[in-house]
Image (cartoon, rainbow, N blue to C red):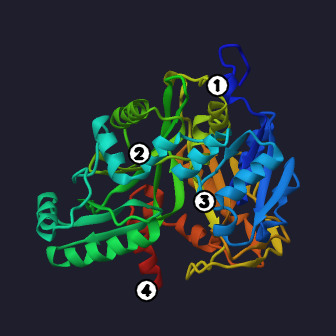
């Protein structure tokens, strides 16, 4: 992206050093984007990650605490101190950890640093599912049937709301995310028990017992729309993804674009997302998540951060989303118009996890052998190498295998070949599970919804 007077950063946004407040493959990805933009990087680590390979390629590498994430990657004071000591002017939170923590974003800005992400107010609005739904309804974004208010305490009022929506309903924590804090209620006599259990779960996990209720859609797909916005009133959407392949509400395989959705159906939804961003003054990258059933879209939440699955959109749109995110934080004007955004071909991403392929229990240990596929249309985002010690302290994601090809069928074939050429020894991984999934006929035909993978796994176990 060439520098011009029109696209130069505002004085208050200039920085030349970025502290990466994360670990693993996303730390490597952000570091690469920074280097390509001519920026210095500060890597941080816990004691468990002292030997992380990205430490040696950063300009500074600081250990900020013990192995426990609560005492290191979630320690806001330690991260801010590291930024000051290393002379960083900005902090990139990656995904997970503090990436959607409004208090942290606010603390970064108050410390005189740039938070490479949305403003604290935007995070707060969209982080609370009730206020997010209210904002989306005001912007004309279609939402799942159900009120845009928290559930009251009165049992009879709750019963009335459920009847108005119609069973089955789903109870969700207002501050929830990551598949936690939700419970499906198929009939009325199970409602109050579900409310009590979810309230307690929400209180413990998210610090708030606030709940809301929506219609439970029985056969939807999970569709996402990627957006990016600058500080100058410009907002774009970069196409759509299908993330329906989920186990226990956790994504396993993602693809772009979502197959079988006509442009005239998705276009108004994408533009409504853009309008919603402009309405709340959103800055940076974000993802609107929808359920899609019977030709209709229903908003469920917005992730105010970089997504794990951003590579499939990069592969199809040609936009380096991480670089664009950093440049927006520097104060640059987006150098694309909506008419410039074209999505070509098809892309898949497989999340490779250190876990048993049958039980999905985490697998820690030393990687004794690693072979990764190469070739046209193949990308691997990872931080591991032969000799790397996989820690038991953090998420089991160790690599993302991404492919791109002209058509969905060709991309599936390419992924099969790429998975066949991926070897990780010394620990267990989900690679055998992924190989089997890409041989499944219904998945190959795009005939799946968000419940399909769970049902597929039950049939495999019963066989």
Q: Which residue is mark 2?
A: 125
Q: CA distance from mark 1 to mark 2?
A: 24 Å
The answer to the question of whether label 1 and label 3 lie on touching residues, with beta carbons closer than 8 A, is no
Q: Earlier in the sequence, mark 3 or mark 4?
A: 3
Instruction: Report helix, strand or loop for mark 4.
Output: helix
Tell me, yes or no, if residue 341 can be seen here: yes
Query: What residue is drawn where x is 23% and y is 59%?
Result: 215
Q: CA distance from mark 3 to mark 4?
A: 37 Å
Q: Which residue is mark 1?
A: 332
Quarter holding residue 219 = bottom left
Q: Earlier in the sequence, mark 1 or mark 3?
A: 3
Left or right: where does residue 170 sit relative to residue 310? left
Q: CA distance from mark 2 to mark 3?
A: 18 Å
Q: Residue furthest bottom?
A: 462
Label 4: how many residues lie within 10 Å, few (<14), some (14-19) or many (20+)? Answer: few
Tell me the number on the disc at residue 167.
none
């Amino acid at each position: 992206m060439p520098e011009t007077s029109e696209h130069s950063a505002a004085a208050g946004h200039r920085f030349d050093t970025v502290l990466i407040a994360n670990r693993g493959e996303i730390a490597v990805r952000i570091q690469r984007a920074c280097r390509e933009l001519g920026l210095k990087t500060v890597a941080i680590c816990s004691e468990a990650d002292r030997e992380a390979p990205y430490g040696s390629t950063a300009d500074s590498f600081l250990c900020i605490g013990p192995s426990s994430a609560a005492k290191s990657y979630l320690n806001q004071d330690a991260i801010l101190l590291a930024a000051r000591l290393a002379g960083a002017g900005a902090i990139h939170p990656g995904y997970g950890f503090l990436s959607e923590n409004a208090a942290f974003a606010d603390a970064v800005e108050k410390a005189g640093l740039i938070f490479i992400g949305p403003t604290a107010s935007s995070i707060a609005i969209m982080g609370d599912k009730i206020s997010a739904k209210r904002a989306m309804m005001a912007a004309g974004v279609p939402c799942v049937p159900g009120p845009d208010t928290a559930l009251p305490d009165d049992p009879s009022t709750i019963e009335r709301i459920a009847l108005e929506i119609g069973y089955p309903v789903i109870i969700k924590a207002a501050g929830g995310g990551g598949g936690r804090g939700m419970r499906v209620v198929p009939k009325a006599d199970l409602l109050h028990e579900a409310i009590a259990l979810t309230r307690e779960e929400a209180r413990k996990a998210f610090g708030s017992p606030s709940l809301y209720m929506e219609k439970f859609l029985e056969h939807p797909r999970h569709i996402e729309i990627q957006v990016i916005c600058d500080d100058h009133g410009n907002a774009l959407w970069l196409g759509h993804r299908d993330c329906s392949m989920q186990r226990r509400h956790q994504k396993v395989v993602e693809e772009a674009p979502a197959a079988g959705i006509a442009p005239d159906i998705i276009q108004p939804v994408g533009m409504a997302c853009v309008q919603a961003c402009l309405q709340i003054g959103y800055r940076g990258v974000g993802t609107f998540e929808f359920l899609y059933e019977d030709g209709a879209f229903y908003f469920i939440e917005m992730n105010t951060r970089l997504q794990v699955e951003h590579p499939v959109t990069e592969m199809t749109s040609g936009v380096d989303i991480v670089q664009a995110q950093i440049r927006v934080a520097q104060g640059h004007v987006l150098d694309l118009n909506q008419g410039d955004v074209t999505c070509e071909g098809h892309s898949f991403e497989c999340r490779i996890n250190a876990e048993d392929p049958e039980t999905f229990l985490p697998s820690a240990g030393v990687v004794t052998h690693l072979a990764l596929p190469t070739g046209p249309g193949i990308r691997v985002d990872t931080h591991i190498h032969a000799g790397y010690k996989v820690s038991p302290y953090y998420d089991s994601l160790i690599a993302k295998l991404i492919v791109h090809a002209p058509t969905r069928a060709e991309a599936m074939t390419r992924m099969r070949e790429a998975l066949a050429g991926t070897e990780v020894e010394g620990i267990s991984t989900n690679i055998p599970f992924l190989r089997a999934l890409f041989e499944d006929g219904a998945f190959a035909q795009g005939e799946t919804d968000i419940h399909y993978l769970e049902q597929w796994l039950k049939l495999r176990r019963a066989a």
